[in-house]
Image (cartoon, grey):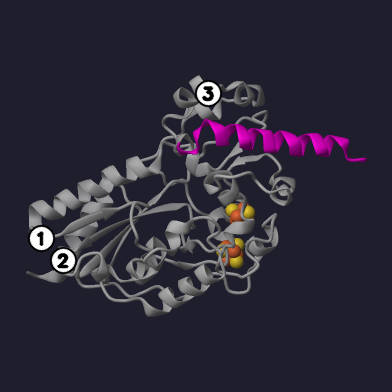
Amino acid sequence: MDTAAVKEEIHLEAMHLGFSKCGFASSRFLAEDFSRYETLIAENYHAEMLYLGKEPQKRFYPSLIHPVIRTVIVLMAGYKTQAQQRKDAGYIISKYALIPDYHIIMMDQVKKLSSFIDGKYHPKILLNFVDTGPISEKAWARQAGLGNFGKNSLIITPEGSYFFIGIILTDLFVDPDEPFYEDLCHDCDLCVKACPTQALHKPYAVDARLCISYHTIENKKDIPASIVEKMGTKMYGCDVCQEVCPLNRRQAVNSVFFSPLSSLLDMRAKDFEAVGPTDFKQRFHESSMLRLGYRRYKRNIEAVKKMAASERKRPS
Ligand code: SF4
Ligand code: SF4
């Protein structure tokens, strides 16, 4: 089999399916990435996301997931849209939750590419991941030549950072791409300075214990007062460290799979506050916000309200 031709055909099909980027890496142990990850876990940068500390080697060594894996195919899909919440929304939702749940949409597209590969080349193994397994999407995106870590801890590319990442592991051999080692940040530190909670105090890593995204999306307990004070109107997630990135200012609207959810864009502050336990599911069923559940939704609403109330009391 002509491995260069195979790679070209898979790449072409990925573009045809609407992915923004597709890269290939040889399966091996990413020792340097693993060591960096291990240090961050030891320092508790993952807060209460204990699953991140389990079997960490697997994330960087696909042979531990399945011994015959030879290639890691990395897919990126842009999700930048022109969608904007109303000016009187009062409660800000992260951009990625204003579109249909990427876990579902992206996985459907990844599976379509897997089916194409299966039908054409008949590999023994095709494993698909979209935030669904122990694989470091970011480290493999760099290894497959698609982008590099930014000081905001995300994968940044010359075309910006509003991308979801999907992975296919396979025993099919495909010529690997060159890893992306160019530092795209240079002497910029806009994200580090703009972060409201200093969660980027160690550039290229996010300290989840301080991150508004972590506390409004992942944290299952109460949000600490020190974070509530800095949340402003951010009710679900935080895009500050992406919004200030110069690479994103020039990122084109590039969403192919993801159409904005007008039912969320149209919500006013009073609509957010009126959502009850029975209509929470109906209101947010298409968004990844559904995963929050009503209890934590109310917790976040109350945190923003508390912040707004203390702002009003503050002498001008
Ligand atoms: S998501 Fe927000 S709080 Fe978290 S690191 Fe980025 S700017 Fe800071
Ligand atoms: S804002 Fe600057 S430092 Fe931060 S990720 Fe973007 S380019 Fe890098």
The picture places residue 309, in percent across and down from the top left corner, at: 80, 34
The picture places residue 32, in percent across and down from the top left corner, at: 42, 79
* Residues in magenta, as a range: 291-316
Indicate whether residue 310 is drawn in magenta.
yes
Disc tally is 3
The earlier-in-sequence mark between 3 and 2 is 2
| Magenta residues, dominant SS class | helix
Pointer 3: what residue?
Answer: 277
Please, what secondary structure does the residue beneath circle 1 have?
Answer: loop
Viewer-side residue, 178 vs 297: 297
Specify the label residue 262 is tagged with: none
Q: Amino acid at mark 1?
A: Lys
Mark 3: give few (<14), some (14-19) or many (20+) Cα within 10 Å.
few
Q: Are marks 2 and 1 in contact (CB under 8 Å)?
A: yes
Q: Amino acid at mark 2?
A: Asp
> Which quarter of the rendering shows the C terminus?
top right
| Residue 212 located left or right of residue 64 | right
At 75% across and 39% down in the image, what residue appears? 307
Discs 3/2, front: 3
Indicate whether residue 35 is drawn in magenta.
no
Mark 2 and mark 1: Cα distance apart in space: 7 Å
Pointer 2: what residue?
Answer: 171
Pointer 1: what residue?
Answer: 124
